[in-house]
Amino acid sequence: MPVPRRILALLLGLTAFLATPLPAEPPAVEFKNPWIRAVPPGSAATAGFLVIVNRGDAPLQLTAAKSDVSGEVKPMITTRKTVDGQDVAGMEFVDHLTIPARGKLVLEPGGDHLMFLRLGASPQPGTPVDVTVEISGQSFTIPFDVRKK
């Protein structure tokens, strides 16, 4: 028995609707306490700090950052190793920083941070600095406070 055209059209339309992918949701992230260290005029670099909370079920990666106050912003980790029986702290640029699923990434003084290189102007307290971070393919622009400490 032939299927009426209206039912066939309805079934085809429903099939097409169900096959359409849903738009990707941006990562469920929250930014807490973003700030940049104020530096004297003429300084070549400074550091930025914040806490990034991942509310999602999958880990995320902070892969890039940029700001108008610097020529380059790079993720940096703090390293510790023993040399000749002495603890030696250092810093190392990395391609990304991981924000664990249902966890947080803490960027803080003395620890991992964002390094702002080739400063065009020295960030000063009272003038926020917009920083755009790239997290797992999504861009977020965050106003960072500028503080002396």
Image: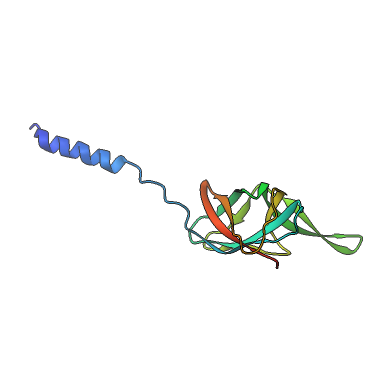
Residue at point 52%, 48% (across, down): 139
Q: How many marks?
A: 0
Instruction: Pinpoint residue 73: horizontal percent, then vertical percent.
Output: 66, 49
For residue 62, say whether it is visible.
yes
Name the residue located 56 percent from the left edge and 50 percent from the top edge.
Answer: 132
Would you say 101 lies left or right of 72 here? left
Q: Position of residue 105 (x, y in %)?
A: 60, 61
Which quarter of the rendering shows the N terminus? Answer: top left
| Residue 31 x %, y % | 54, 61
53 relative position to 80: left or right: left
Which residue is at the far right?
A: 84
Instruction: Please tell me in which quadrant of the rendered image residue 145 appears.
Output: bottom right
Horizontally, residue 14 falls left or right of residue 70, namely left
Is the image coloured rainbow, by chain, by secondary structure, or in one colour?
Answer: rainbow
Q: Is residue 101 above or below residue 9?
A: below
Query: Where residue 110 sits in the image (x, y, percent)?
Result: 73, 64
User: Is residue 3 visible to us here?
Assistant: no
Which of the pair 44/52 is nearer the observer?
44
The quadrant in which the C terminus is found is bottom right
Q: In the figure, is residue 21 to the left or right of 85?
A: left
Observer-nearest residue: 109 or 9?
Answer: 109
Residue, x 38% and y 46% (percent of image)?
A: 23
**Residue at 16% across / 35% down in the picture?**
9
The residue lying furthest to the top in this view is 2
